Image (cartoon, rainbow, N blue to C red):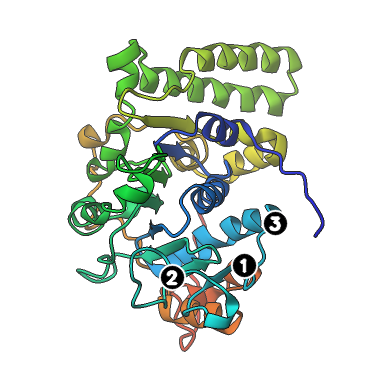
Amino acid sequence: MIEELIELNAPQQISVINNAPSEVNIEGRGTGKSYKIGWEINNIVRAMPRSITSITGRTYGQILTRTLPSTLKLLEKLGYEKDLDYRIGGKPDKKSGFIEPYEKVTKFDNFISFANGTGFLMLTQERQGSSRGPNLDREIVDEALTINKQRYDEEVSPANRGNEEYFGFKSPNPIPQHHGFRYVSSMPYTREQMWLLDYGKYYEEEAGIQIFDIWNRIVKLQLQIIEAYKAGDKRLFKDIWNETVRLKKQIAPFVSKNGVLFTLANAFDNVQNLGMSYIVREYDKQNLLTFMVEILNWIIDKVEDCYYPLDSQKHIYYDAYNDDFIRGVAENTNWDAKSLETGDCRFDLDCDPSKGLEVVFDWGT
């Protein structure tokens, strides 16, 4: 096996170093969120063998195309080999030597089994009650802003119980992460999604740090950094950059008294891998609001008072994944990460291959 050096960006380093019992990561695109889930899985496999952790997404299409590919890549870099160290879907053959989890598993269709008995149950909210499963030892939620929080609290969170004699307070060596959670998400922007930001209120309550106000000041300065970069003004670029560094020190991440680490990050925190060219390209390509929220992770604090209020039932939906087709691709390719992130138009439920394209010209002025 060839060893590969793994370099972590700043948000990933913060997560690894703190190793908090629970974690909420609100980060824009290009920050390596899925890598964090891969590292999380690695930690659980090592610290809680024979445990079961849920990986929840709104649909299987979301999990298979957005969560798994990057996660599997990191596991590969860490030395895990598919079908040897872990298996996705299907019950491992007894001859394989795989140990079973402490909790009995009856269905392996949406299950990731590791050789030491650790399991990860992929859950979705496609149907009422479909998120129910066996007793869990930990929770992972990817793109948490898309889930129905009430249903999640009714179906998944109550199952995060049991096995205290192996990992919890009854164990001679309790694992701090047992019965904890990790919520990974892009920035919420509707009233129903703002529960995610509530986890960051401890900054002000425990340390008097107004994290959200300071973060938005950083984002606005980063817009000026982009303009300075485009104008070729190196001195202004450096001065503004240094000011953002100073402000970031004021919101240095720390773990709350309840054991929760809340973090904010955006593409600038991964600029050493993305390059300024990526940020500038997205800035020029997207409308300003989309860029600020999706890339720079700007906190929209006036959504409820905006002229055109967002109604999550009318204006937003996340069910455009063709889950049946994606599931077929996954099974036929033995869950190959490259096949799942190809961007095949047939992955999109909005695409009807039996109909022609309708093209409408917008001549502008």
Total tally of numbered discs in the picture: 3
* Numbered mark located on residue 111 in the image: 2
Question: What amino acid is labelled 3 in the image?
Answer: Gly
The spot of residue 283 in percent (x, y) is: 58, 39
* Residue at left offset 67%, top offset 65%: 81
Asked if the residues shown at circle 3 and circle 1 are in contact, with their CB atoms under 8 angstroms apart, the answer is: no
Quadrant hosting residue 177? top left
Q: In the image, which is nearer the foreground, mark 2 or mark 1?
A: 2
Does 325 sit above or below residue 56? below
Q: Looking at the image, which residue sits at the far front?
A: 172
At numbered mark 3, what does the secondary structure look like: helix, strand or loop?
A: loop
Quarter placement of the N terminus: bottom right
Q: Which residue is label 3 attached to?
A: 79
Is 7 positioned to the left or the right of 41 in the image?
A: right
Q: Check disc 1 and report its element: helix, strand or loop.
A: helix
Q: CA distance from mark 3 to mark 1?
A: 16 Å
Residue at left 39%, top 40%? 172
x, y percent for residue 87: 55, 72
Q: Are marks 3 and 2 in contact (CB under 8 Å)?
A: no
**Amino acid carrying mark 2 in the image:** Phe
- The residue labelled by disc 1 is 337
Q: Alpha-carbon neighbours of circle 1 within 10 Å: few (<14), some, or many (≥20)?
A: some
Report, in whole angstroms, how far the alpha carbon at label 3 lies from the one at label 2.
20 Å
